[in-house]
């Protein structure tokens, strides 16, 4: 049996006698020994499980089982269209799930005073980045790329509050997942910035190009520098990341994709090309098909059937933009294909 420091001192009490003075002095020594050395018989605390918020606001959150979140945080405040609203440690989260509502596909975090988490690592930054200090400018600088989009910039009416977005795609290490900022055009800084962006485009293009055609969503790189400068200091309302985030698409491309071909002919708007369909259920030469259409292929290789929509080794899936969409020539089409780990 090991003799602790405190135990040795207590034995000393018995040896020298139990006078009041001895007891007082030894009691003081025992307290000092406990403070300095602690009790060696006390077990070290077990390592704590990472808190749920830290797990969710990280890339580990994408692909996490929704049942795990429900087990730790309880049922969602509300759920609709595969979007599940939670309040976790003071942060308002919306978790987007797959079709069967089994796994998390995306995470949206509201920027509020009570939710000040570090997202520097998530963005690949070498230093911490406070969520509440995030602006369009700091995000753009961290990601080094991205598209500025908007629901509407002029004559939007009063039916809804439009948003502006900055959408960036992660690196290959992040499996080309998306990261996005969203700002509502409801505050003076955001509305003034959007106004400067719109005015500059009208001066170069036309009122119709901005108001009706929403050309900035079809050719986001054309006036990107103007948008970046105008929105540089604007703070977003939401920060989102994951797979297949929701943001505005080119209306001309959507119209072409949704229109029915007549007499077997495939109609494509002037200046646009159609994202081709894969040849059969398992097209292993889809990259060649894209290049033949004047598009760039961005293949994301997955080791093993990790995804629920896996179609077979070497088969393409999760094609974005989806086949049938009309896009500008030279656009990048991202898709996944799975290969056996070797």
Image: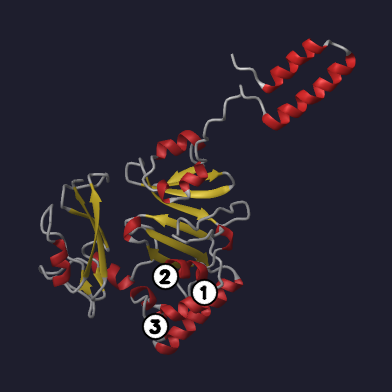
Q: Nearer the viewer, mark 3 or mark 2?
A: 2
The answer to whether residue 96 is left or right of residue 304 is right
For this rendering, which residue is in front, 2 or 147? 2
What residue does disc 3 label?
Answer: 208
Q: Which residue shows up at 56% across the image and 66% down it?
A: 235
Local SS, label 3: helix
Local SS, label 2: loop
Is residue 74 visible from the viewing direction of this image?
Answer: no
For this rendering, which residue is in front, 23 or 89? 23
For this rendering, which residue is in front, 273 or 48? 48
Q: Is residue 60 above or below residue 214?
A: above
Q: Position of residue 5 (x, y in %)?
A: 68, 22
What residue does disc 2 label?
Answer: 144
Rounded to the nearest angstrom, the CA distance separating label 1 from label 3 is 22 Å
Q: Position of residue 83 (x, y in %)?
A: 42, 48
Q: Which residue shows up at 55% across the image and 74% down it?
A: 191
The answer to whether residue 121 is left or right of residue 335 is right
Q: Quadrant of residue 251?
A: bottom left
Residue 299: image tag: none
Q: Quadrant of residue 316?
A: bottom left
Q: Position of residue 214 (x, y in %)?
A: 38, 76
Number of numbered labels in the structure image: 3
Rounded to the nearest angstrom, the CA distance separating label 3 from label 2 is 30 Å
Q: Which residue shows up at 17% across the image and 67% down it?
A: 290
Rounded to the nearest angstrom, the CA distance separating label 2 from label 1 is 15 Å
Q: Is residue 116 above or below residue 139?
A: above
- The 10 Å Cα crowd at callout 3, few under 14, some 14 to 19, many 20 or more, is few
Q: Which residue shows up at 35% across the image and 40% down it?
A: 102
Q: Position of residue 27 (x, y in %)?
A: 81, 21
What residue does disc 1 label?
Answer: 231
Marks 1/3 in contact by CB < 8 Å: the verdict is no
* Badge 3 or badge 2: first in the primary sequence: 2
């Amino acid at each position: 049996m090991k003799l602790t420091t405190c135990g040795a001192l207590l034995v000393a009490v018995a040896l020298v006698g139990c006078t009041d003075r001895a007891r007082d002095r030894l009691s003081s020594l025992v307290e000092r020994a406990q403070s300095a050395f602690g009790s060696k018989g006390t077990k070290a605390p077990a390592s704590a499980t990472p808190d749920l918020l830290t797990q969710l606001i990280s890339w580990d959150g994408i692909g996490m089982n929704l049942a795990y979140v429900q087990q730790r945080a309880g049922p969602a405040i509300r759920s609709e269209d595969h979007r599940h609203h939670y309040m976790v440690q003071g942060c308002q989260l919306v978790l987007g799930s797959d079709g069967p509502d089994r796994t998390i596909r995306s995470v949206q975090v509201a920027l509020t005073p009570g939710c000040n988490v570090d997202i520097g690592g998530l963005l690949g930054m070498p230093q911490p980045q406070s969520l509440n200090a995030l602006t369009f400018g700091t995000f753009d600088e961290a990601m080094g790329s991205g598209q500025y989009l908007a629901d509407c910039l002029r004559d939007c009416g009063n039916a809804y509050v439009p948003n502006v977005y900055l959408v960036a795609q992660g690196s290959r290490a992040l499996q080309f997942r998306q990261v996005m900022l969203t700002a509502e055009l409801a505050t003076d800084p955001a509305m003034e910035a959007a106004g400067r962006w719109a005015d500059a485009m009208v001066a170069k293009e036309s009122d119709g190009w901005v108001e009706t055609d929403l050309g900035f969503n079809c050719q986001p790189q054309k006036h990107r520098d103007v948008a970046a400068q105008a929105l540089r200091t604007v703070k977003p309302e939401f920060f989102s990341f994951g797979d297949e985030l929701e943001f505005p698409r080119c209306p001309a491309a959507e119209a072409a994709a949704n229109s029915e071909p007549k007499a077997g002919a495939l109609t494509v708007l002037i200046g646009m090309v159609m994202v081709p369909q894969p040849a059969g259920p398992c097209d292993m030469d889809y990259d060649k098909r894209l290049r033949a259409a004047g598009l760039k292929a961005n293949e994301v290789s997955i080791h093993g059937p990790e995804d629920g929509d896996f179609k077979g080794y070497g088969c393409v899936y999760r094609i974005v933009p989806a086949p049938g969409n009309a896009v500008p020539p030279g656009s990048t089409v991202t898709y996944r294909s799975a290969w056996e780990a070797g």
